[in-house]
Every structure is written in C-alpha cells, then in structure tokens.
Image (spheres, coloured by chain):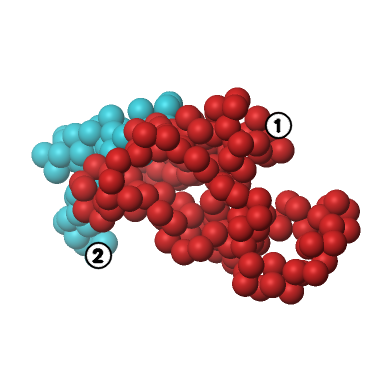
Chain colours: A red, B cyan
Amino acid sequence: MGAREKWLLLFILGVGPLLLVVATFGLSFKRAETLRFCSDCHTMTPWVADLKDPHSQSLAAKHYRNRWILDDQCYNCHVNYAFLGPVEAKIDGVKHIVAYYTGYGMHRRIKLYEPFPNGNCLRCHENSALWQHNPTHQALMAQLRGNKVSCISCHGPAHTPKGLKG
Amino acid sequence: MPTTIEIAFILTGLGLLATIPCLLYTTPITMTIFFFLGIPLFMAGFIVYLYTVIVDLRRHGVM
C-alpha cells in the first residue's frame, strides 16, 4: 500500500467521519430548537395544538398567534438562561428522546422539572417600558426577580392542552 | 487490503448510513440513531483503523 493510499485511508476513516460527526452534531442540535422538532413527538401534540389554536387564551398561544416570539417558540421559553442553560436544555432534550423510545423515566403526567423561572419571561420583557412602568410589577419587583411570585400566577395559564389522560 | 481495513470500512459505512438521515432531516428518530448508532460505529471504525496502523508501524519498526 503506497503513501497516497494511506493518506486517503486516513481521510476516509478518520478525518472525513470526524468532520461529518461535528457538522451533524451542530446542525442537529440547532434544528432541535425548532417548533417542528418538538412537535414531532406525539406526547407533545396537545400542547402544540393549544399553541396553534387561534381561539386559545393561554400565554403560549398568544405569544405564538401574535408572533411575540418569532421562531422556536418552545425553545425560547423552556430553555433556562443560566450559564449553561442552552446546553442543559439540549441534554434534557436527549433524555426526553431516550425516555420516549425506551419508556425508562417516562412519567404518566408531563410536568416541569422545577417551577418555571421568571427569568425566562424577563429575558424579553424586563427591559420593556410597559413592563417597568406597570404599577403591579413595580410593587412586586423584588419578588418577581427573586422567583417568589411567578409571572404565570397573574398571566397564566401558560398552556391549556386538551384531551390529556392520567 | 488487510481484513481489518475492510472491517473499518464496513463500520464507517454503517456509521454513514446512520448519520446521513440526521444530516438531511433532523427528527427525534434520526437524531437518536445518529447519537446512539452513528457515532459509536464511526468510533469503532476509527479504532479498528488505528489498530491496523499501529500494527503496520510496528512491523516496520517505527513503534
């Protein structure tokens, strides 16, 4: 086997697959942020149906209907914007996929891992004049920022999925 | 061509089959297949190739 063949083998069996894996890794994680990806799992059908329901008064539906969130509506609200928030959200996503296909870790009732953090709302709303000048928000500023009072307690429900069992 | 290289080719080819669908159309299914089949197959193919290279280098007294 000549030197040229050996270099070709290195590319075909080493460098090429590595580049392909890196590209697929990055692209797939990016695409996993989309609404279409989340709605691919049938478990999420009631939530997506509510999101897209033009008559629903849920917070998610209003954000979707008015395009207050332009794209990737699920991801924009459900990623916690801590230091590694997006990374943790993606790891959680992989756990969901494993649970969905193996049944391990699947719960009868879908619920958040922890109470929905206000920071996910404040990321967009905090710097708006409308939010800042609202007297109720001003009165509750410390509690809102400290997650003692949830945004959802006044502005909910976040979702009104229909036809849930269990 | 050594048998081990052929094995490496087969493993890499299978890895490619598991990866291309995810690259073209990312769904939970294709992503699961890529992460749990594609990447391990690529790694296995590379390890077999690396083993062949090390054996070859030792035969030529380089290692």
Image x and y of residue A16, in percent: 40, 39
**Quadrant (top left, top right, bottom left, bottom right) of the C terminus of chain B:** bottom left
Q: Which mark is residue B43?
A: none
**Relative depth, front residue between B9 and B21:** B21
Image x and y of residue B31, in percent: 36, 39
Image x and y of residue A164, in percent: 35, 39
Residue A5 visible at all: no
Amino acid tagged 2: Met
Q: Name the quadrant containing residue B32.
A: top left
Query: Of helix, strand and loop, which one carries label 2?
Result: loop
State how far apart marks 2 and 1 are (Cα).
Answer: 66 Å
Tag 1 residue: A66
Amino acid tagged 1: Asn
Q: Name the quadrant containing residue A105.
A: bottom left
Tag 2 residue: B63
Image x and y of residue A68, in percent: 71, 38
- What residue appears at the point 37 percent right and 50 percent down from the top-left corner? A110
Numbered disc 1: what chain? A
Query: Of helix, strand and loop, which one carries label 1?
Result: loop
Judge whether A92 appears above or below A147 on screen: above
